Amino acid sequence: MGAVACQNPLESGAPGSLGQHDVHIGLIHMRHAPVGGTELVLNRVARHLAERDHEVTIVCRSHGEAPHPAVKFKVLRAPVI
């Protein structure tokens, strides 16, 4: 049986390595607002990830200002019946 070489996928240049914007992160919350405990944590996490060049989208029904210029929003609308 032959030996198998394993590479760290986080190393630059390794096959399948994580480069800029390879991680797309969706944070989901009913509403995005500038106040509230959950909202404050959501904003901090989104800002932290965006500052590290991850692609961040907040999925919500309504939103305020983005916590970082690179953070996007996907607004969910209730279906019309």
Image: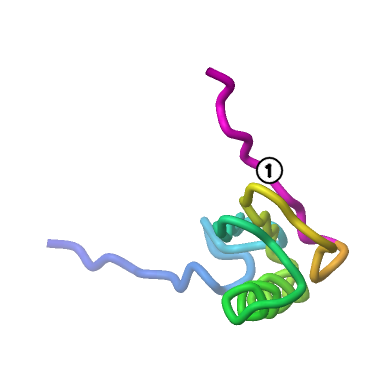
Camera-side residue of 8 and 64: 64
Question: On the rendered structure, is 4 left or right of 64?
Answer: left
Would you call the spot at circle 1 few (<14 residues within 10 Å), some (14-19), or many (20 or more)? some
Main secondary structure type of the part rendered in magenta: loop
Query: Which residue corresponds to the image point at 73% horizontal and 50% vertical from the top-left?
Result: 73
Query: Which residue corresponds to the image point at 63% horizontal and 51% vertical from the top-left?
Result: 60
The quadrant holding residue 51 is bottom right
Name the amino acid, label 1.
Val
In the rendered image, the residue lying farthest to the top is 81
Task: Tell me if residue 41 comes above or below residue 80 in the rendering.
Answer: below
Task: Tell me if residue 78 comes above or below residue 56 in the rendering.
Answer: above
The image position of residue 35, as x and y in percent, is 72, 77
The image position of residue 68, as x and y in percent, is 83, 69
The image position of residue 58, as x and y in percent, is 66, 56
In the rendered image, the residue lying farthest to the front is 81
Image coloring type: rainbow
In the rendered structure, which segment of residues is drawn in magenta? 70-81
> Residue under circle 1?
75
Q: Secondary structure at mark 1?
A: strand
The quadrant holding residue 39 is bottom right
